[in-house]
Image (spheres, rainbow, N blue to C red):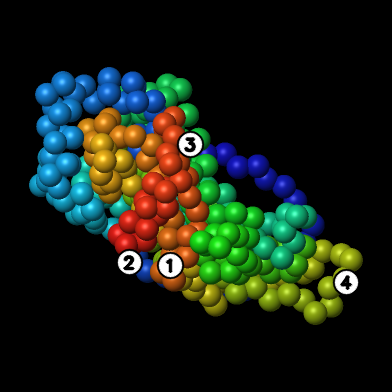
Amino acid sequence: MTRGGGEWGYLVRRRGVGAAVFCLRSRVGLAGDTDRTRMVGLSIGEKHFIQGGIAQDLRSDGRKRLTYRPISVETGNIPQANCSARVKMGATDVIASVKAELGKPSPFQPDKGKVSIYVDCSPTAAPMFEGRGGDELSAELSAALQRCLLGGKSGAVNSSGLNDSGGGIDLSSLSIVEGKVCWDLYIDGLVVSSDGNLLDALGAAIKAALSNTGIPKVHVAASASSDGQPEVDVSDEEFLQFDTSGVPVVVTLTKVGRHYIVDATSEEESQMSSPISVSINRQGCICGLTKRGGAGLDPSVILDMISVAKLVSS
């Protein structure tokens, strides 16, 4: 995964020995409906079996409609990363890693840091990931996570519209010197194995990785001129715990017939109609919302799905 580099023009002195970021503790199918059905290869009888079971609140694997598969979380899986987490939901297996680098704030948000999210789908995770299919899915997942975890320009959305606080990744906490120096967080996700509900699994892995990430304490030289680039001192011994209190979880609701289900498997996703992913933090703020699929939904249905997602996330 290649990133663009650049020289920001400030001076950096390091104290002690260590890396710039420290790990404090060692934890969807988006393709078209036709492609999903072809890849899963369900017969008409199997489709009716899945739909009938969901209608009776008894899914093929024994779960109820709003029950997740067993979830396992491990942290520190990638030694080369500053921090990482691996999440498994049934046969869905994803990894997320976090790296922080000093950068320059955007001129449109001089008092905030920056977050970039990129997802890669391993060609061995599913047949549809081979060739362009994997690239297209990677781009869609990356964009969906960006919307869900960062929300609007301010990073938070609630029932009353945009809000400047209360949800999403707090970009203000990544600012060092307004307009000149900030932390850039690079979040990479990898789909190792896919059996549905990739977005929720990746969102959980990212939150787990962020919760184990320490941001080095930065000291700014008092002698820095107001119009020049400041001299900063990055500590290798003092770290600040990254605040994840506002980082949301992602809940994807899939509509099958007249009912909603969570944590859909690949077989269930082949029967889905316009899934909606809602990101909700522990304060109950809706930080982001994304809809996939070509079928339209009545606004009342969307509001109902949001209410169910908030209930599931609590």
Residue 314 — which label? Answer: 2
| Residue at image mark 4 | 225
Q: Indicate the amino acid at tag 1.
A: Gly
Q: Are marks 1 and 2 in contact (CB under 8 Å)?
A: yes
State the SS at label 2.
loop
State the SS at label 3.
helix
Q: Is residue 189 visible?
A: no
Cα distance between the residues tagged 1 and 3: 26 Å
| Residue at image mark 1 | 284
Q: Indicate the amino acid at tag 2.
A: Ser
Q: Are marks 3 and 4 in contact (CB under 8 Å)?
A: no
Residue 270 on image: x %, y %: 27, 30
Q: Which is nearer the N-term, disc 1 or disc 2?
A: 1
Q: Residue at x 42, y 52 (%)?
A: 303
Q: Which quarter of the rendering shows the C terminus?
A: bottom left
State the SS at label 4.
loop
